[in-house]
Amino acid sequence: MEVPYRCLVPADSVSFIIGKGGATIRQMSETCGATMSILKDGEAPATLADKIVIIAGSEVVRKLRQMQGVTDMEPGVFVIIIPQISVPVVIGTKGAQIKDIMEKSGAEINVGREAIIGMSDQPISINGTVEQVVSAVSGVNSVLQDMMDRGKLRESDFRKIDPSGPSTPSFSTP
C-alpha cells in the first residue's frame, strides 16, 4: 500500500477544494493523478475545527497551496497528520531524522506534542515555500512508507479516525 498524505485544512476552505458540484476536486484528481477525499462530519472528532483531507499522490500539495492563494515563493504553513506510533521514527534519535528532513528541504518543521483529541494521530506543521513544503512532506512520507514496507505500520494506522466513531473513510473523490 502507498502511504497516503493526510493534512488538515481550515473548514472554511473546503468549499474551494470541492468546487461547484465537485468540479474542482475532480479536476485536481485528474490533473495531478491523485485521489482525494475529505472526511465528512462524524468521520473525524467533533473537537477538530479543521477538516481532514486524505490524498494519494504528491502534486496535490502544490495545488492546495495555490487554491489557498499562496504563491510558490511565499512562505505558508501546511499541516499534515501522521500516526502517533510513527512520531519517534520521524523525529529520529536525538532529532536526527527530522533535522535531516529540515536541512534537505529548507522548511521549518514542528511536530505537535500531543495527539489530536479523539484520534491516534499527531499534527506536523511545515512552514516554507511550495518547494520546501513539498520536499518536507515527501521526506516525512518517505519515512512512513519505509515503516509501512517494513511492517511497522499498517493500512489501519492511516484510516482509523476514532475507534468509537463511524466506519473507515474511503479514498475516492466525490
Image (spheres, rainbow, N blue to C red):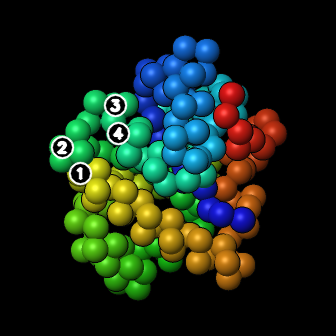
Q: Position of residue 140 (x, y in %)?
A: 45, 67
Give the labeled residue for mark 4: 65
Give the labeled residue for mark 2: 74
Which residue shows up at 58% across the image and 47% down it?
33
Give the labeled residue for mark 3: 68
Assign a secondary structure to mark 1.
loop
C-beta proximity under 8 Å, tags 2 and 1: yes
Under mark 4, the amino acid is Arg
C-beta proximity under 8 Å, tags 2 and 3: no
Could you tell whether 39 is left or right of 124 in the image? right
Under mark 1, the amino acid is Thr
Which residue shows up at 45% across the image and 35% down it?
9
- Of callouts 2 and 1, the N-terminal one: 2
Q: Position of residue 121 (x, y in %)?
A: 57, 54
The disc placed on residue 129 is: 1
Neighbours of disc 2 within 10 Å: few (<14), some (14-19), many (20+): few
Under mark 3, the amino acid is Gln
Under mark 2, the amino acid is Glu
Label 1, label 4: how far apart the Cα atoms are: 10 Å
Label 2, label 4: how far apart the Cα atoms are: 10 Å
Assign a secondary structure to mark 2.
loop
- Of callouts 2 and 3, the N-terminal one: 3
